[in-house]
């Protein structure tokens, strides 16, 4: 984690996150009446626990829990040399993709490039009947024609801001923060002055 | 948008070529081992396409001056699973290739825009000469008696995966484990690269074999030498059998095959002196019942075929790191 954030603001607390996830689960269940044909792929790392929670919530509503898998996308990125070569997790799921309705789940939707990579990876496993996307946060800044079918909240963020989702499974708490960093020009100027 | 804050271990790889384990730091070796599991998962996909688009449109040339099945196929498959194009070139093993010819041939391959050259050569140092004066990424697939770095990396990966499965600790390392290499150490580039690699990873290496097949002053590389197999196998976590190069038997480096078998063969009899759960490894090809008893090679402790599967994943990791992180051609 970067520790040079100039400041940070909490934009979503645990309770609001539960509300969003419950509503998303309802919407997903409504849009997918045949729950057994639905499979969920959480994008590592934080999309995966969100997918598991959504699956549990859907089970509470319909009595059926969609199967959940993890997808890494690291081997399909277009900026491969800037992403870690040795990711902690890699793609794993046990179900068939062919003919299923695949729901990709991620924490933050930004440029849309991760989702593009995830879709390419899904197609290497089979031919899904359709692909949908669920994201907790849409922070804007899209570079590809991609949008979320199921969204928690739109939180527009600037170029020098980083939207960070913290989840109790990985971080011990549920929270969304916006962290602000000094702009690069300002950093350069600061370095020159120093 | 600002650069992504790093939540995972940041990649530290700048190397363009893989010439030998001697050049690598422990961190670099671990980076290769940490990069490989995701590629092992690609090969194990139950459905769909068993490849990833990391080297799409790149050209990998397999250039083998010496006979090889496993290594050549393994590199070719690794390149194909990364979506690279591959060409294979073999030169007669008997022809003595002079430095100039080597350069000329490579200049011709490079004129075809090759990105990766995988070279096996009977002259030690051949890949180093090429790497110094050419722009493609050079991978040493075995040079004379010198090094065979990808073999040592896949061996370390195989041992580490086993330790992690056995102990249930996903962070388990080779620190402190005991590995015994048995056989022809003198002529073995596999042994040389393994001694270097295992030492860097903190393992204790014991070498065992006939004195005539033991290089002089090999202890200086950081290995214990032991001429009694039973003694060498005591407490070993891994028993690594090396191929007896029968083609060298005519030089009379040991009195007879029968005597070799009696003193140095890894079999039920000698393995009574090793722990029951010691892993059995061999780089292939095996002379069955010569250096290694056939039933041991095929037995439950043997991970010889796992070595082969892991070889593809580790070679994918190496090519990916060299090309995508080690600078463009």
Image (spheres, coloured by chain):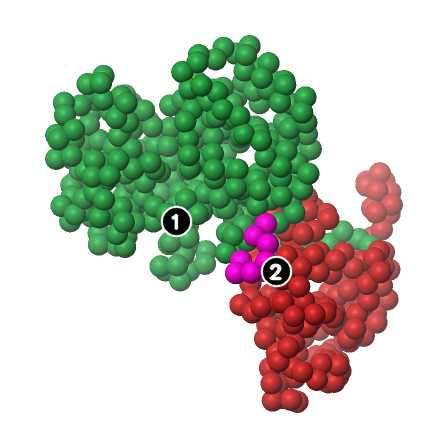
Within-10-Å neighbours for mark 2: few <14, some 14–19, many 20+: some
The chain to which mark 1 is attached is B
The secondary structure type at the circle numbered 2 is helix
Image spot of residue B62 (x, y percent): 53, 30
The residue nearer to you, when weighing B123 against B3, is B123
The residue nearer to you, when weighing A110 against A92, is A92
Q: Which mark is residue B77?
A: none
Image quarter hosting the N terminus of chain A: bottom right
Within-10-Å neighbours for mark 1: few <14, some 14–19, many 20+: few
Question: Measured along the vertical axis of the image, is residue A44 above or below residue A75?
Answer: below
Chain letter, green: B
Question: Measured along the vertical axis of the image, is residue A36 above or below residue B179?
Answer: below
Question: Measured along the vertical axis of the image, is residue B120 above or below residue B163?
Answer: above
Is residue B207 something that shows in the picture? no
The secondary structure type at the circle numbered 1 is helix
Q: Which residue is tagged 2?
A: A125
Q: Name the main secondary structure of what is drawn in magenta.
A: loop
The chain to which mark 2 is attached is A
Image spot of residue B36 (x, y percent): 52, 48
Colour applied to chain A: red
Image quarter hosting the C terminus of chain A: top right
Q: Nearer the viewer, mark 2 or mark 1?
A: 2
Q: Is residue B49 magenta?
A: yes
Q: Which mark is residue B306?
A: 1
Is residue A80 something that shows in the picture? yes
> Seen in the image, is A1 located left or right of residue B289?
right
Image spot of residue A155 (x, y percent): 83, 69
Tell me the magenta residue range.
B45-51
């Amino acid at each position: 984690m970067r520790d040079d954030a100039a400041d940070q603001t909490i934009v979503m607390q645990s309770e609001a996150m539960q509300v969003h996830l419950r509503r998303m689960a309802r919407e997903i269940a409504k849009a997918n009446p045949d729950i057994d044909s639905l499979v969920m792929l959480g994008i590592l790392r934080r999309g995966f626990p969100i997918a598991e929670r959504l699956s549990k919530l859907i089970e509470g509503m319909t009595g059926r829990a969609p199967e959940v898998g993890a997808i890494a996308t690291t081997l399909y990125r277009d900026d491969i040399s800037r992403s870690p070569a040795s990711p902690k997790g890699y793609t794993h799921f046990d179900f068939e993709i062919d003919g299923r309705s695949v729901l990709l789940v991620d924490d933050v939707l930004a440029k849309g490039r991760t989702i593009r990579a995830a879709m390419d990876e899904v197609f290497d496993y089979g031919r899904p009947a359709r692909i949908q996307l669920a994201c907790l946060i849409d922070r804007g800044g899209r570079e590809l024609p991609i949008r979320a079918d199921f969204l928690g909240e739109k939180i527009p963020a600037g170029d020098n801001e980083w939207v960070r989702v913290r989840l109790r499974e990985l971080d011990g708490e549920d929270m969304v923060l916006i962290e602000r960093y000094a702009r690069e020009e300002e950093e350069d100027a600061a370095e020159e002055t120093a | 948008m600002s650069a992504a804050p790093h939540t995972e271990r940041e990649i530290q790889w700048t190397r363009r070529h893989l010439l030998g384990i001697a050049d690598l730091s422990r961190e670099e070796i671990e980076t290769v081992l940490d990069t490989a599991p995701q590629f092992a998962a690609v090969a194990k996909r139950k459905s769909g396409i068993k490849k990833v688009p990391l080297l799409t449109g790149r050209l990998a040339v397999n250039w083998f001056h010496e006979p090889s099945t496993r290594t050549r196929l393994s590199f070719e498959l690794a390149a194909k699973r990364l979506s690279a194009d591959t060409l294979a070139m073999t030169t007669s093993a008997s022809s003595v290739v002079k430095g100039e010819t080597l350069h000329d041939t490579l200049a011709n391959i490079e004129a075809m825009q090759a990105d990766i050259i995988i070279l096996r050569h009977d002259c030690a140092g051949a890949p180093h000469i090429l790497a110094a004066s050419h722009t493609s990424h050079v991978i040493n697939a075995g040079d004379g008696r010198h090094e065979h770095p990808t073999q040592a990396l896949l061996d370390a990966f195989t041992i580490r995966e086993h330790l992690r499965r056995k102990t249930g600790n996903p962070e388990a390392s080779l620190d402190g484990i005991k590995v015994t290499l048995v056989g022809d150490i003198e002529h073995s580039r596999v042994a040389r690269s393994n001694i270097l690699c295992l030492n860097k990873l903190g393992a204790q290496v014991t070498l065992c074999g006939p004195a005539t097949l033991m290089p002089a002053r090999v202890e200086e590389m950081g290995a214990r030498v032991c001429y009694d197999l039973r003694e060498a196998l005591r407490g070993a976590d891994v028993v690594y059998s090396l191929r007896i190069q029968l083609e060298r038997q005519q030089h009379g480096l040991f009195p007879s095959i029968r005597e070799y078998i009696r003193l140095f063969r890894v079999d039920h009899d000698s393995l009574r002196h090793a722990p029951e759960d010691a892993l059995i490894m061999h780089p292939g090809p095996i002379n069955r019942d010569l250096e290694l008893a056939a039933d041991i090679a095929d037995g439950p402790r043997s991970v010889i075929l796992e070595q082969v599967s892991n070889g593809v994943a580790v070679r994918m990791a190496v090519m990916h790191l060299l090309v995508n992180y080690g600078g463009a051609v």
